[in-house]
């Protein structure tokens, strides 16, 4: 069978908890893997050209005292032409960002010392007092999957921000874009997938689709839970001890951990402290200290033993150290 006759009709997936392998058949497959798009394209075609240029952006988090009030600061051009912002965020202040070309991609990108120094140096010019390395509660890096349009062939360019690529095998790749255009990106990818897979075309409902937990005028008091806060408060009303915070320096309560396990499929301490809440980003050391409390709550919900708890606390502590400047 020639390469032209090879058509992708599914994926092989492995359950990371049990090791069980699944073979999933489908009419069409979409590669929506961000910075890892090129790796998937290489799996499909070893000769595929790279389409992603990765850029790293670093942020630091400081206590609120460095920017009293609720107004943000935007510096459109620093001494070397880069953009700087200082924004009140969950009772802290987030400062960023950088734009550094990166060759190797990673699930846990590490901030470079010169990036942190750039942020501290320039932030000091605009904040109520000069921040030092010891004031940084958390430092983290994100990788931007920028599309190098000169390398993209046979694509349908749907905007200046993202592209949709159809490989010879029928693999759909959605690449580029940003969080603020995710609905448009999803709609464009699905429309193309429907055509490639011979699926029935239906009008998109995204324009008026409310996200889960939607509440009118919810504000920041709901910490992103929206209408789910009703369920969390009910847990506390039945079990008052769940109203306690997981750590004095963090705004999250024990009931939220239980909620994440029961309703949001949290399986690890990292899930709770890094992905379901912003604990790791708000205060890395406090999140390390909160890990045993979170592990205990999760173990009761999931039926895990002390060995599991110890392993979870150890693994999270190792991860969280990468978010501090004292490594």
Image: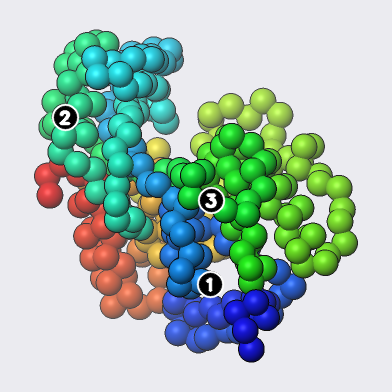
Horizontal side, residue 76 vs residue 9: left or right: left
Q: Compared with residue 301, is residue 161 higher up or lower down, i.e. above or below?
A: above
Of residues 305 and 61, which is closer to you in this image? 61
- Residue 259 seen by the camera: no
Q: Are marks 2 and 3 in contact (CB under 8 Å)?
A: no
Which residue occupies 27% across, 26% down?
A: 63
Circle number at residue 117: 2
Q: Secondary structure at mark 1?
A: helix
Which residue occupies 58% across, 27% down?
A: 219
Q: Position of residue 35 (x, y in %)?
A: 43, 53
Circle number at residue 13: none
Which residue occupies 34% across, 37% down?
A: 57
Among the 4 quarters of the image, the one containing residue 10: bottom right
Q: Which residue is mark 3?
A: 152
Q: Which residue is mark 1?
A: 44
Q: Are marks 1 and 3 in contact (CB under 8 Å)?
A: no
- Work out how far the residue at label 2 is from the one at label 3, CA to CA, in angstroms: 35 Å
| Mark 3, other Cα within 10 Å: few <14 / some 14–19 / many ≥20 | some
- Work out how far the residue at label 1 is from the one at label 3, CA to CA, in angstroms: 16 Å
């Amino acid at each position: 069978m020639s390469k032209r006759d090879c058509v992708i009709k599914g994926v092989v997936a492995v359950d990371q908890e049990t090791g069980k392998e699944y073979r999933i058949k489908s009419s069409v497959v979409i590669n929506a893997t961000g910075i890892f798009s090129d790796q998937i394209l290489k799996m499909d075609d070893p000769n595929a050209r790279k389409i992603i240029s990765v850029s790293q952006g670093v942020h630091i988090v400081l206590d609120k005292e460095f920017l009293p009030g609720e107004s943000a600061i935007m510096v459109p051009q620093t001494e070397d032409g880069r953009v700087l912002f200082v924004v009140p965020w969950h009772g802290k202040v987030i400062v960023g960002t950088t734009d550094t070309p990166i060759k190797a991609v990673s699930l846990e990108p590490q901030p470079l010392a010169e990036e942190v120094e750039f942020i501290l140096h320039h932030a000091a010019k605009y904040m109520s007092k000069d921040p030092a390395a010891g004031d940084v509660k958390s430092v983290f890096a994100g990788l931007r999957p920028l599309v190098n349009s000169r390398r993209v062939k046979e694509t349908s360019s749907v905007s200046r921000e993202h592209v949709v690529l159809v490989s010879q095998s029928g693999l759909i790749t959605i690449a580029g874009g940003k969080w603020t255009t995710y609905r448009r990106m999803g709609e464009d990818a699905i429309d193309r997938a429907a055509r490639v897979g011979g699926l029935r075309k239906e009008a998109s409902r995204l324009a008026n689709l409310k996200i889960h937990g939607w509440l009118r005028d919810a504000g920041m008091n709901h910490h992103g839970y929206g209408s789910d806060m009703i369920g969390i408060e009910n847990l506390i009303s039945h079990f008052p001890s769940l109203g306690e915070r997981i750590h004095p320096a963090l705004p999250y309560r024990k009931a939220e951990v239980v909620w994440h396990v029961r309703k949001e499929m949290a399986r690890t301490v990292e899930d709770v402290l890094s992905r379901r809440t912003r604990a790791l980003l708000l205060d890395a050391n406090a999140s390390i200290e909160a890990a045993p409390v979170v592990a205990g709550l999760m173990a009761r919900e999931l039926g895990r033993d002390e060995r599991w708890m110890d392993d979870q606390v150890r693994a999270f502590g190792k991860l969280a150290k990468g978010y501090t400047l004292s490594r």
